[in-house]
Image (cartoon, rainbow, N blue to C red):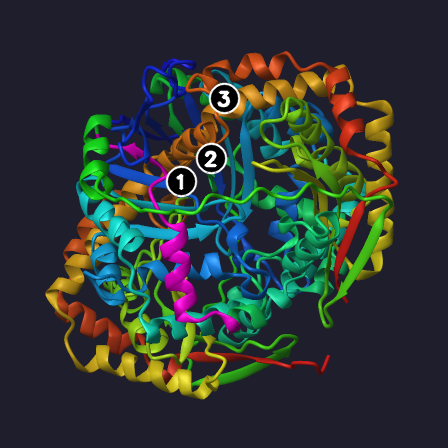
């Protein structure tokens, strides 16, 4: 079945992508804003995520208690996500009800109230969200690593923000951030599902084109300088299980090396699924599983490559075997990293990684919410074409490419190693 | 526009066949994506576990893929992962389950691996020991997880002296006591085609799906497959029971307050389900979310859930709160439960939830996995192949009185199980 794709930019700068998919009477509408924790300064960390929460607190037209009920009543599913680079809002609705979602999104692009009482009650909700995160050893470790790896660049802090800022930020901080970044020229509207493109486009124009363009949002220009030397850190906390995370610096998703590195990730740790709604596959025959889990240095190992605007990190997470020390796990990992740098991988391994990626794509396209996701997601760090040509670019990766990027990116002097040291019975 | 009712599974597009050896096959095709899901269950749940070897059923299911008469652990996963397929087993109280997916071109391979794991596992000693360390680490992590521990404590209060009070993943000492022989014996006694159900959904014709299952598992015969034991009756709580499980050093406590709920087949299931949606799901987590999260700002999550299966279920309200706010949140939730059984629900609330139930159905059936779950639900609870076509009617016939009577039947604010895990 051929799916029609429409791409157009409205006069106010709002980019619109429409993909007709007539497999079920469902439409998924996604509105992406190019704003995330990457756009936050110290003192206002977590502001993007908090603004996202405030977007559910109502406008004049859709007051808070009516808003969520309106979507749910129509059988819709909706949510929002804030990431380091972007904030996304989606509604997946029965096809004949999608107009409600479109009206809601155009309204809250400009008319959210940010009522001071709502700001007050949401402050403790978000503090509670952060406290829940702090219960997790891997959150504590990840946060320590990120703030070490990024001293200058705003990837320094977690999306949820620092506790101090969650206590001190004001309603004005939130509102100003909203006004600065929630402008049509900083947004992408992506809709997939059971509609006709022409009438959908007409409706989107009616609802969105009258919203005036804003000034181009100012971006922080604080690139992270090169790291010259390995950094090791440890975090202590409750528990009896040790974790080690090893983080290498990775390029942005738009960099050509992102593709050979994706294949390398697949070989080392099993394929990372960039798709948020369709799960992954096991990694029990990846190189790291065979070398680390099979040989009982760790009980699990995972790799995570993420598609980002600015260079971010590739993180290998190991849950250390109860009979091993973190240093033993790290030494075993280093042997495998050395091997991929010194010895060429086989052509078969690359072919396998591509087949895995193809399967993950197929699973992702079972679902219309997912198709809507991909339409806009790739626009945040590249263009939709990035997604459409992804498999072709993976297929072009050679054995030589893999060896080159392994040597270029998996360098000990630019990595950060973090260990979670459990303090059993001490706290 | 795609037609709304016809897109729901029904007797005209669900294929169902019982093989001579007792396996029920359900199939429905979906050629929109070149992928396929295989999922189902069989009768080898944790209900068979002896107390001193709790976790045996789960250990057995996880060990199935650690080596078979035909392939080693690495060979099994190499075959799967090389084609981007996945296959896994899990264990519940009554049944054990499985879930796999692949590109449709690889379905024969997926079924071969599944069949080998199920019918000819060899439980290699070294692999069993590796697994044991992984299971024990999992239990050590569980012991530090406030949500997991609150849930375990809750089940212990609510299902006292009943098999439902036992965690399917066992305890460190029971996992330590399980031997390879126990796994072999458990597999020998409890695995068999009787009672097994497989759903295959995706880019394959139903008749091809059935043919492939027949080829892989049609010849499987087991003599003396043990019958699932009868469960003892539940002892209802006589008064509210509070338990606080201490986990030091955590920033947040998990709180669960609840009581028993209906079985899936009970006539009250639909009215309980609608009531639960109003109580702690609808919109941003219903009335509970409104009071605990929106109005008081006490929690990021606060919701209610109904868990209804083959036996008596539970009806619980969960929240993650700062350790200092446990009492405050707990009082708010108890007040809401009281209000719920005193006042019932309003006509508007009822209409909202009914619309929500009917409207969201196509969304839950979007993916192959969603359809597989739906068909297995029909089969497990004998709901009829036309269940999802009749669903709107079943939802709409529930009245506010039904919801109130059901709430009063199950919820007694003086007889609650209250579990807290945290500092």
x%, y% of residue A173?
Answer: 70, 51
> Which span of residues is magenta-colored?
B177-204
Disc 2 vs disc 1: Cβ atoms closer than 8 Å?
A: yes
* Mark 1 surroundings within 10 Å by alpha-carbon count, few (fewer than 14), some (14 through 19), many (20 or more): many
Q: Residues within 10 Å of mark 2 (few under 14, many from 20)?
A: many
B340 lies left or right of B142: right
- Outermost residue on the front side: it is B224
Please identify the quadrant where the C terminus of chain B is shown: bottom right
**Is residue A248 among the parts visible in the rendering?**
no
> Which labelled disc corresponds to residue A98?
3
Residue at horizontal 34 percent and vertical 59 percent from the top: B64
**In x, y percent, where is residue B265?**
58, 27
Residue B379 picture quarter? top left
- Identify the chain of the residue marked 3, using the numbered disc in the image: A
Q: Residue B184: within the magenta?
A: yes
From what the image shows, is residue A252 above or below residue B94?
below
Residue B199 magenta: yes
Residue A86 sits above or below residue A408 on the image: above
Residue identifier under label 1: A376
Which residue lies under the disc numbered 2?
Answer: A30
| Disc 1/disc 3 C-alpha distance (Å) | 17 Å
Specify which label sits upstream in the sequence, 1 or 3: 3
Same chain check for tags 2 and 1 = yes
- Marks counted in the figure total 3
Nearer to the camera, B19 or B29:
B19
**Is residue B87 something one can see in this rendering?**
yes
Query: Which quadrant of the view contains residue A395?
Result: bottom left
Q: A1 and B286: which one is in front?
A: B286
């Amino acid at each position: 079945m051929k799916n029609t794709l429409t791409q157009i930019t409205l006069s106010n700068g709002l980019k619109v992508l429409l993909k007709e998919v007539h497999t079920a009477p469902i439409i998924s509408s996604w509105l992406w804003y190019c704003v995330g924790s990457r756009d936050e300064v110290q003192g206002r960390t977590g502001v993007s995520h908090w603004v996202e929460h405030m977007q559910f607190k109502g406008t004049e037209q859709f007051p808070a208690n009516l808003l969520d009920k309106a979507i749910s009543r129509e059988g819709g599913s909706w949510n929002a996500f804030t990431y380091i680079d972007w904030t996304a809002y989606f509604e997946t609705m029965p096809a004949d009800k999608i107009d409600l979602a479109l009206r809601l999104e155009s309204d809250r692009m400009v008319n959210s109230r940010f009522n001071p009482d709502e700001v007050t009650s949401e402050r403790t909700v978000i503090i509670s969200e952060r406290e829940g995160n702090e219960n997790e050893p891997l959150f504590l470790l990840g946060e320590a690593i990120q703030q070490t790896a990024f001293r200058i660049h705003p990837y320094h802090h977690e999306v949820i923000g620092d506790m101090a800022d969650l206590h001190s930020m004001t309603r004005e901080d939130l509102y100003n951030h909203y006004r600065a970044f929630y402008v049509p020229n900083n947004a992408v509207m992506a809709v997939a599902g059971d509609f006709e493109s022409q009438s959908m486009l007409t409706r989107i124009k009616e609802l969105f084109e009258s919203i005036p363009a804003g000034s181009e949002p100012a971006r922080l220009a604080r690139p992270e300088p090169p790291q010259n030397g390995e950094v090791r850190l440890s975090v202590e906390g409750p528990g009896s299980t040790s974790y080690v995370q090893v983080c290498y610096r990775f390029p942005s998703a738009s960099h050509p090396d992102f593709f050979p590195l994706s294949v390398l990730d697949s070989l080392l740790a099993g394929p990372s699924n960039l798709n948020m709604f369709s799960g992954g596959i096991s990694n029990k025959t990846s190189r790291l599983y065979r070398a680390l889990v099979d040989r009982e240095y760790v009980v699990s190992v995972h790799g995570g490559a993420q598609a980002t605007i600015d260079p971010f990190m590739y993180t290998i997470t190991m849950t250390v075997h109860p009979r091993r020390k973190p240093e033993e796990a790290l030494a075993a990992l280093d042997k495998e990293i050395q091997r991929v740098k010194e010895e060429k991988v086989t052509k078969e391994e690359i072919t396998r990684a591509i087949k895995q990626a193809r399967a993950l794509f197929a699973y992702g396209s079972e679902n219309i919410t997912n198709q809507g996701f991909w339409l806009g997601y790739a626009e945040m760090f590249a263009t939709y074409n990035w997604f459409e040509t992804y498999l072709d670019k993976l297929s072009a990766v050679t054995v030589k490419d893999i060896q080159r990027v392994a040597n270029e990116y998996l360098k000990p002097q630019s990595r950060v190693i973090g260990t979670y040291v459990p303090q059993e019975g001490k706290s | 526009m795609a037609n709304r009712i016809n897109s729901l599974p029904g007797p005209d597009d669900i294929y169902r066949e019982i093989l001579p050896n007792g396996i029920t096959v359900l199939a429905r095709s979906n050629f929109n994506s070149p992928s396929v899901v295989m999922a189902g269950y069989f009768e080898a749940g944790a209900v068979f576990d002896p107390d001193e070897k709790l976790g045996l059923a789960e250990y057995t299911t996880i060990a199935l893929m650690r080596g078979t008469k035909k392939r080693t652990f690495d060979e099994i996963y190499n075959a799967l992962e090389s084609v981007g397929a996945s296959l896994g087993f899990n264990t519940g109280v009554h049944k054990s389950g499985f879930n796999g997916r692949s590109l449709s071109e690889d379905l024969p391979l997926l079924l071969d691996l599944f069949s080998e794991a199920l019918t000819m596992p060899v439980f290699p000693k070294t692999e069993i020991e590796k697994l044991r360390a992984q299971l024990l680490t999992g239990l050590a992590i569980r012991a530090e997880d406030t949500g997991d521990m609150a849930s375990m404590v809750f089940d212990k209060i609510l299902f006292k002296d009943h098999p439902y009070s036992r965690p399917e993943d066992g305890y460190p000492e029971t996992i330590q006591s399980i031997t390879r022989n126990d796994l072999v014996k458990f597999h020998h006694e409890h695995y068999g085609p009787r009672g097994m159900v497989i759903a295959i959904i995706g880019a394959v014709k139903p008749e091809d799906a059935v043919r492939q299952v027949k080829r892989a598992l049609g010849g499987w015969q087991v003599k003396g497959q043990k019958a699932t034991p009868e469960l003892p009756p539940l002892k209802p709580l006589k008064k509210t029971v509070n338990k606080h499980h201490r986990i030091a050093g955590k920033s947040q406590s998990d709180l669960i307050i609840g009581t028993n709920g209906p079985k899936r087949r009970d006539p009250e299931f639909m009215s309980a389900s609608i009531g639960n949606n109003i109580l702690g799901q609808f919109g941003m987590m219903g009335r509970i979310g409104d009071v605990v999260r929106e109005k008081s700002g006490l929690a990021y999550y606060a919701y209610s859930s109904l868990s209804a299966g083959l036996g008596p279920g539970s009806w619980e309200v969960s929240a993650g709160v700062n350790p200092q706010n446990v009492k405050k949140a707990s009082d708010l939730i108890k007040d809401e439960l009281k209000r719920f059984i005193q006042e019932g629900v309003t006509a508007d609330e009822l209409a909202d939830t009914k619309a929500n139930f009917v409207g969201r159905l196509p969304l839950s059936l979007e993916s192959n996995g969603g359809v597989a779950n739906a068909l297995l639900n029909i089969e497990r609870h004998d709901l009829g192949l036309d269940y999802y076509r009749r669903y709107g009617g079943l939802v709409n016939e529930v009245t506010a009185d039904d919801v109130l009577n059901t709430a009063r039947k199950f919820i007694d604010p003086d007889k609650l199980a209250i579990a807290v895990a945290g500092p």
